[in-house]
Image (cartoon, rainbow, N blue to C red):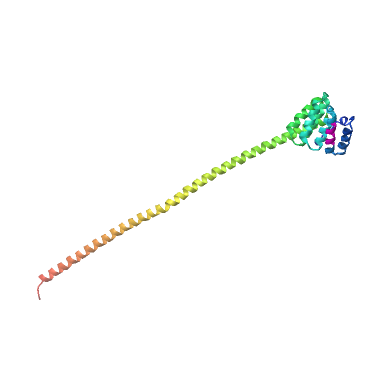
Amino acid sequence: MRYFILTVLAFLLLGLSSKDARKANEEYNKGNYEQAISLYKKAIDANPNNAKLYYNLASAQAKAGKTKDAIRSFEQFKSMTDDSQAQARADYNIGNVLANKKKWEKALDYYKKSLRYMANDEDAKHNYELAKKKLEQKQKKQKQNNKNQKNKQKNKQQQNKNKKQQNKQNQNQNQKNKQNPQKKNQQKQQQSQKMSKAEAQKILKALEQKEKDLLKKFKKQKTESSKSKNGKDW
């Protein structure tokens, strides 16, 4: 599988007359991009109207990982040339720089620009499709993350709701438990009062029965005494 590759127009690295420019090209080809950047800037100071120097500077900055500087230099190059093919190549390289930073939307915009004048460029087509696919994956992942976040928030709200309901139930139960001892005491007192009344009635009945028994006994004794006085003495 091919990856995003920053390409450089080879003809722009040739035909530079200044010593600093030639030395910069040598350092660039060796992979010494920081030295190349410094030398390209010196060459630009000496020859500020040379568009090729800005393109080469941008390429060295891109290789050195200086994304913003590289894009500015490529844009400067585009403003200094009327060559649509060269501008398209600069747009393609900006697209690559942005793709390397995973800025897929912006990269797609620059690939589209480059394909207007490089419609048959296979690398540009490939990178455009690859960036498009990466953007779709990013958007899909973001959509899933948003959905997960919403579900997480919804679950949290439900948990909070359940927690509030549970707390309310606990408070009601605690209140009920506080009231129960009082209720039990009242019931106990009522039962005690009922038992005392029943016992009192029982005692009263017992006294009444005892009184009846004594009265009956007294009457019996009186009757026997009367009989004894009226009888004959043999």
**Residue 181 picture quarter:** bottom left
Q: Which sits in the foreground, 94 or 60?
A: 60
Q: Which sits in the foreground, 144 or 72?
A: 72
- In the image, residue 224 lies in the stretch drawn in magenta: no
Considering the whole magenta stretch, tell me its main secondary structure.
helix
Q: Position of residue 35 (x, y in %)?
A: 84, 38
- Residue 169 in the image: above or below residue 47: below
Residue with the most extreme front position: 46
The reply, left or right, for residue 142 in relation to residue 121 is left
Name which residue lies at 69% across and 35% down. Answer: 140
Name which residue lies at 87% across and 37% down. Answer: 27
Q: Position of residue 103 (x, y in %)?
A: 74, 34
Q: Which segment did they paint magenta?
A: 36-43
Name which residue lies at 11% across and 71% down. Answer: 229
Name which residue lies at 22% across and 63% down. Answer: 211
- In the image, residue 41 lies in the stretch drawn in magenta: yes
- Residue 152 in the image: above or below residue 209: above
- Residue 130 in the image: above or below residue 171: above
Q: Is residue 34 visible?
A: yes
Q: Position of residue 202 (x, y in %)?
A: 29, 60
Q: Is residue 5 visible?
A: no
Picture quarter with the N terminus: top right
**Residue 234 picture quarter:** bottom left
Q: Which sits in the foreground, 177 or 5?
A: 5
The reply, left or right, for residue 158 in relation to residue 229 is right
**Residue 203 picture quarter:** bottom left
Q: Which sits in the foreground, 172 or 110?
A: 110
Q: Position of residue 232 (x, y in %)?
A: 9, 73
